[in-house]
Amino acid sequence: MSTLNKTLASSGIHGTQGISKFSRSTNVETTVFHSRGGLFQNSWIASLQQRKNSRHFLVMDRNIEKLYGSKVLAFLKQNGLKVKEVVIAPGERSKSLSVYKRLINSIITLGVDRDSYILALGGGVVNNVVGFVASTLYRGIGLIQIPTTLLAQLDAAIDFKQAINSPYGKNQLGSYYSASTVVVDPDLLQTLSLRQLRSGLGEAIKHALIEDQQLFSYLEDYHGNLRDKEFLDDVIARTVQLKVLLLNKSNDEKDLEMLPQYGHAIGHALEHLSHYKLLHGEAIAIGMCVMSEIANVLGVSSAKVMEKHYQIMSKFKLPTIIPNYISDQSILVAIRHDKYFLRNLRSVLTSNVGSIANVAEDPAKYVFNIESKVIETCLSRNRNKTLINQRVKIWTRKN
Ligand SMILES: NC(=O)c1ccc[n+]([C@@H]2O[C@H](COP(=O)([O-])OP(=O)(O)OC[C@H]3O[C@@H](n4cnc5c(N)ncnc54)[C@H](O)[C@@H]3O)[C@@H](O)[C@H]2O)c1
Ligand SMILES: [Zn+2]
C-alpha cells in the first residue's frame, strides 16, 4: 500500500487504482478506468469493438498528436477499429465556437454515423470542446475521454459538464453530457510541464480544502518530487474517488454541484481577464485564497484556515495574489457571468481545512450569498497580502 493510502486507510475512501462508476440520472453511466499504462491495454475498448463497422474519431491538440497520436492510432487500428484523427490548436482559445464548428464540419465530412464514438485525447480543453461536440451531434453520440493533464485526469474529465467559452466569459455554452468511458493513465503525465502539473494540483488542493483534511495533510507534508509516479497516482486516485462520490450524490442533492466550484467564480473571472495567461489551476488557486478571506470576514472560519490556503498554494508554487493588471471593478463585472451568480455571488466556504461551512447552522444549506461589498473588501485584503509579504521580506533583510 502506498504512503497516501496507508495514511488514508482509516478514512473509508481508498485511493487505489481501478474502476469506478458515476452517472447522471438522465444520462449514460460513466466507467472510469484508472491504471498506469492502462491506455494501451484492451480493457477500455470493448464498447468500441462492439461498433467495429462505424468510423470513430480521435481528437487531439497538436502537442498531444506529436507526443502520442501515432501510438494511440496504431493501438486502436491493431484492435480492428476504423479511426480518423482530427487535430486542433492547443490552448484555451480552442474552447470556442469556431473550433466547435470546425470539429463538427470535419467529423461530418469524414463520415460519422449514430454509432460512431468520439475520443478526446488531451487536457481539459480538448475534453471540454469534444464533449460539447459529442453532446450535440445527432443530439448525442458516443464519447470517450482520455485526459492527458493532471488537471483533466483528476477533475475536468471526471464530470458531465461539457463547455466552450463565449467572448463574454468562461464555459458560457455547454451541456450536461456523460462520456461512457474515461481512461486515466498517469504515465502520460511524465511529458507534462511542471507549470501544468502545478496547475493540476490546484484542483486536488481544492478537493482537499473542501472535503478531505487527510488529503490536505498529505499534500502539506509531501516534500518529494512532483513527477514522482506514486505521488501522482495516489493524488489522482484519491481525488477521482472524491469527485465520483460527489457526482453520484449530486443526483439527489443538487447543491452538491457547488462544491467543485469552490474558488471558481473569481478564478474564472481572473482566467478570462488575464486573457488566459493564468492557467485554470493558477486562477482558481487565487480564487480560493480570496474565498478564504471572505470566509474569514464573514466569521465562518479563522485566520489560521485562511493562512493555510495561502501556504499550501505557495508550497506548490501556485499564485495567491490577484495580478495588478486586473482591476477590482473588472472582476466584479466578470463574476456576474458566472453560471451560479444570482443577484449575488454564490459559493461554498470552508469552515475548516477539509470541511465546508453551513449557512445559519442549517446542515442542508451550505451555499452562501456573498454581497459585492464583502467581495470588494476581500479583493483588497488579498492584494494587501503582497504588501505584507514584501514588508516581511524587507524586515528580514535589514535584520
Ligand atoms: N468540465 C469540468 O468540470 C472542468 C473542470 C476543471 C477544468 N475544466 C477546464 O479544463 C481546462 C483546462 O484544462 P488543462 O489544464 O488540462 O489545459 P489544456 O487542455 O489546455 O492542456 C494544457 C497544455 O498541456 C498540453 N498537454 C496536455 N497533455 C500533455 C501531456 N501529457 N504532455 C505534454 N503536454 C501536454 C496541451 O497541449 C496544452 O498545451 C479549462 O478550460 C477548464 O475550464 C473543466
Ligand atoms: Zn476547475
Image (cartoon, rainbow, N blue to C red):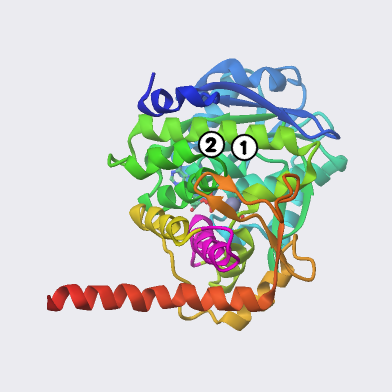
Displayed quadrant of residue 23: top right
Query: How far apart are labels 1 and 2 at the CA level?
Result: 6 Å
- Residues under numbered marks 1 and 2 in contact, where contact means CB atoms less than 8 Å apart: yes
Left or right: residue 83 versus residue 383 is right
Residue 45 in magenta stretch = no
Residue 280 in magenta stretch = yes
The numbered mark at residue 239 is: 2
Picture residue at 41% right of the left edge, 60% below the top = 307
Could you say where residue 120 lies in the image, as x and y percent from the top left? 63, 40
User: Which of the image's four quarters has the C terminus?
Assistant: bottom left
Secondary structure of the magenta portion, mostly? helix
Picture residue at 51% right of the left edge, 37% below the top = 69
Left or right: residue 60 versus residue 225 is right
Could you say where residue 351 lies in the image, as x and y percent from the top left? 56, 52
Could you say where residue 261 lies in the image, as x and y percent from the top left? 64, 53
For the residue with label 2, is its CB less than 8 Å from the closest atom of ligand 1?
Answer: no
| Outermost residue toward the front in this view | 361
Q: Nearer the viewer, residue 326 or 262?
A: 262
For the residue with label 1, is its CB less than 8 Å from the closest atom of ligand 1?
Answer: no
To which residue does mark 1 refer?
A: 243
Q: Nearer the viewer, residue 152 or 213?
A: 213
Q: What crowding class fits label 2: few (fewer than 14 Cα within 10 Å), some (14-19), or many (20 or more)? A: many
On screen, residue 168 above or below 197: below
| Outermost residue toward the left in this view | 399
Magenta-colored span: 277-301
Could you say where residue 145 lies in the image, as x and y percent from the top left? 63, 36
Asked if residue 292 shows in the view, the reply is: yes
**Residue type highlighted by circle 2:** Thr
**Residue type highlighted by circle 1:** Lys
Q: Secondary structure at mark 1?
A: helix
Picture residue at 67% right of the left edge, 76% below the top = 372
